Image: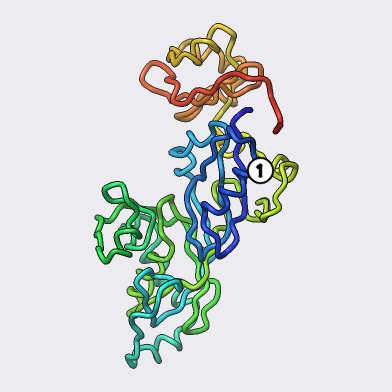
């Protein structure tokens, strides 16, 4: 079976692994399955799942921007930054009465000016980020709080959609690895109070949207899953280039393609892909062979898949 990716909708209240478990039951037993970026149990939305070798694209799919719709409450704080943990703090200062009168436009302007662009964020205590091979949430449950250094993220877009104090509804498009509950905590702190996220939906990863996503249920069938399968080049729209039989075999043995050879193949596709970006999908008889990366004088295979006849689930 060729590598495929599924755009699935994870329901609220389920873990990302709960969704994987359903997919694994649906696919053949030898199918290797993995997801591209976890979603917290209280969140819902797009969860991309790869099978039959597609999981090796994890590092590349993680580079795609992600869009979220979120609802947070100002003036309260929990250990995790979301509603899954008990309330730790409640702001009772007189400032909240003033904050309640601010118009949505004022919040929108202040938060966009502060947070759009480069944004430094440390992973929260309750997260899947790892320390010494264990997720931080496992350490936190044992009473050990691991503080990891902040990492540069990107906030591509941020908009306050509705504001009815203490509730804030906002949409953001962010780089991979950004925790939206931490972003809201930071937003609330910038406004002068605490903040906790109560609802979160991942609306989009790259070109994959929630409206296109297949809803995952316990009775998911192979036919439903088959109808939702996507090829890797539909998710990562790098240029495709057809190579000949000689270079098909060399690529599949991990040999880099000299730049002048690849340019010859590219010219056969016209000027639209004459100057591609950093990655190419080499193909043979319209089948993806893997992924190559542009280096100084050649294109180096980063991922290689075996050549097979297109198949279906058996």
- Residue 211 in the image, given as x and y percentages of width and height: 67, 55
Residue 82 shows in the view: yes
Q: Is residue 67 above or below residue 62?
A: below
What percent of the width, then of the height, locates residue 253? 47, 13
Quadrant (top left, top right, bottom left, bottom right) of the N terminus: top right
> Split into 4 quadrants, where in the image is the C terminus?
top right
Q: Which color scheme does this rendered protein use?
A: rainbow
Q: Residue at x 36, y 63 (%)?
A: 126
Vertical position of residue 74 compared to residue 200: above or below:
below
| 284 to the left or right of 96 | right
Q: Nearer the viewer, residue 218 or 16?
A: 218
Location of residue 93 with respect to 155 vertically, above or below = below
Give the residue drawn at x 56%, y 20%.
306
Residue 257 is left or right of residue 123, and the answer is right
Callout 1 secondary element: helix
Q: Residue at x 45, y 88 (%)?
A: 101
| x 49%, y 10%: residue | 250
Residue 85 in the image: state x and y as whole percent: 41, 73
Residue receiving disc 1: 26
Q: Is residue 233 visible?
A: no
- Residue 142 percent location from the top left of the image: 29, 64
């Amino acid at each position: 079976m060729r590598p495929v990716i599924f755009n699935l909708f994870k329901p609220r209240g389920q873990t990302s692994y709960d969704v994987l478990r359903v997919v694994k039951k649906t696919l053949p037993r030898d199918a290797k399955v993995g997801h591209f970026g976890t979603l917290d149990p209280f969140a819902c939305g797009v969860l991309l799942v790869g099978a039959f070798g597609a999981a090796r694209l994890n590092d590349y799919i993680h580079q795609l921007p992600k869009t979220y719709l979120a609802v947070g409450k100002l003036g309260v704080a929990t250990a995790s930054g979301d509603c899954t943990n008990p309330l730790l703090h409640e702001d009772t200062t007189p400032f909240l009465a003033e904050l309640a009168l601010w118009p949505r436009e004022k919040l929108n302007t202040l938060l966009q000016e502060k947070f759009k662009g480069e944004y430094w964020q440390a992973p929260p205590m309750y997260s899947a980020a790892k320390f010494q091979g264990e997720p931080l949430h496992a350490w936190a449950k044992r009473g050990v709080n691991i503080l990891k250094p902040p990492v540069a993220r990107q906030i591509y877009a941020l908009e306050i959609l509705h504001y009815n104090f203490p509730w804030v509804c906002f949409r953001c498009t962010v780089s991979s690895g950004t925790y939206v509950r931490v972003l809201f905590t930071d937003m609330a702190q910038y406004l002068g109070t605490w903040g906790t996220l109560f609802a979160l939906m991942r609306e989009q990863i790259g070109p994959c949207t929630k409206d296109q996503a297949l809803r995952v249920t316990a009775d998911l069938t192979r036919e439903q899953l088959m109808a939702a399968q996507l090829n890797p080049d539909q998710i990562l729209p790098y240029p495709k280039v057809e190579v000949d039989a000689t270079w098909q075999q060399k690529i599949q043995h991990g040999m880099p393609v000299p730049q002048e050879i690849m340019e010859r193949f590219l010219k056969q596709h016209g000027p639209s892909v004459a100057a591609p970006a950093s990655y190419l999908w080499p193909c043979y008889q319209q089948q993806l062979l893997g992924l190559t990366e542009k280096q100084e004088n050649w294109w180096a295979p980063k991922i290689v898949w075996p050549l097979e006849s297109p198949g279906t689930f058996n």
